[in-house]
Structure formats: structure tokens, C-alpha cells
Image: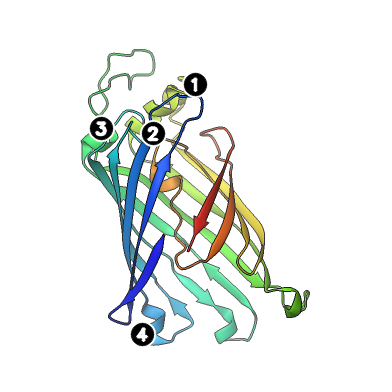
Amino acid sequence: MGQRTIAKYWKTGVTYITFLSPPGNFSQERNIEPYIRFDDGALTGWAFTFNAYVKLFYAISGDSTVVVGNRGDTYDVEIGFVPTLDLKKITGTPLTIAAPTWVTVGPTSYLNRGVTGCGATTMTEACPLSNAGVFTTGLALKESLDWLVPTRWGNWYGKGGFQYYHIINDSLLLAQTFHWDRQLLSDRASRGVGRLCGLGLHLLSIRMKPDVSRLEPSTNLRGSEHGTSGFSFVGCRPANAAPAGFELSVDR
């Protein structure tokens, strides 16, 4: 992933993402993800910032990243902002509080190419078409641990919080039944709260977040953090949705 600052208060970047299935359950999926973000903090210098951004997820080729959608040459858009309060600028306390929030929208064919089965008991019932995919919001706290660990040993920090996910689109619920339990449709298991926690060292961070793996890429490899250099290990645990999973990602 590359990042560039333009016009002083705008940041852009692009990520190339490949999804692989070693067992061969789906063909390789190639995707590209450019974004643009407004750095209002650089403009105002305030302790409270909005950090609004727009991110395009373009599926170049391969199987559908949401299982039942078009296979390649399709896209969706993530629209979000990350309200953040930096208490260090107000009280001197090295703590930041953020509320990552976004929603995904796209053409109906990205989410469903005509696959039926949205009824609780029948596989022939058509899915209601919608341009909306997932809505999520949460709360994240991050504190510098300079008071505990000397900086000569690195810049350590602690992080914790939660993230609420609402799967808006019935086609994403249908996709889950291909991997897990059809009871999800009758239960309308479209909401979940995931816990995130971690301990970081300078360029290295450990993060946990909910995952509706291969159901909606916006909640899979997409994060609302930009400009982080190094490696991060992401542990995924959804609530009332999918089994736990783990992924290794690289942020820059």
C-alpha cells in the first residue's frame, strides 16, 4: 500500500489485494483499493478531528469476493469517517479515543448476480436487491505506554475497544449459508459486536476486529487506519456471524 499527501490536507493511497484459497475452494481474486482522505486535523490543529474518507474496492478478476456477486469487473465503495479525540492536546494524557464508522454501497450485481435462496426454508426465493452492504461503528482507545516502558525499548502502546457490525444486505446473509448454517437466514443474524484489543511496539501492532470473511471485503482486509508503517497481525472474531479466523496484513 502506498500513500501520498496532496494539496496539503488530502491524503491518497492505493492497495493491491489478492485473496487465495490453498484448498482451492475458490479461484484467485485480484482486487485494487484506492482511497482519498481529508486530514482536517492538519487544517485546524484541533484535538477533535473527523478524518472523513472514501475508498473504492474494485474487484478486477476471480471469484466473487462476496460469494454470490459478480465475478470480477465490479466494485463497491466504502464511505466513512473516524472521529478522533486526542486527549494529549487537552490534558496531556497520552490517550486517543476514536469511533471508526463507515458504510459500503455499490451496484446490486456486486452483491448478488442473480443467486436465489433468501427464504428461510426455500432455495428458490429471490433476494431483495439493495445497494447497501454493511454498516459499522465502534469505539477504540489507544494509550501510549511511555510511562510504563522506557522509550529506549521502543514506543509501546495499548489498544482496546469494540466494533458493531450490521449486515444490511440479505445477499450477504445468504452467502454465509454457503459456509455455515442456513438457520442464519431465519434468525436474521445480521448484527454482531466484535472486541478489539492489542499491544503494539512502534511499527508492530496486534489488532483484533470482527470478520465476515469473504462476505463483504469492507469488513475483511479493510481498516480505517491510514499511514501505519510495518506489520500488523489481525485476529478476527465475529459475534452471531462467522467462525473465528486470522489474517496477516501489511500497512504502510
Q: Which residue is mark 4?
A: 43
Tell me what residue is drawn at x 59 percent, y 36 percent: 244
Q: Is residue 136 above or below residue 245?
A: below
Q: Which residue is mark 2?
A: 28
Quadrant position of the N terminus in the picture: bottom left
Q: Quadrant of residue 224?
A: bottom left
Q: Secondary structure at mark 4?
A: helix
Q: Which residue is mark 1?
A: 181
Mark 4 or mark 1: whose residue is earlier in sequence:
4
Mark 2 or mark 1: whose residue is earlier in sequence:
2
Q: Secondary structure at mark 3?
A: loop
Q: Are marks 4 and 1 in contact (CB under 8 Å)?
A: no
Residue closer to the observer: 99 or 14: 14
Label 4 vs label 1, nearer the camera: 4
How far is mark 3 from mark 2, CA to CA? 14 Å
Q: Secondary structure at mark 2?
A: loop
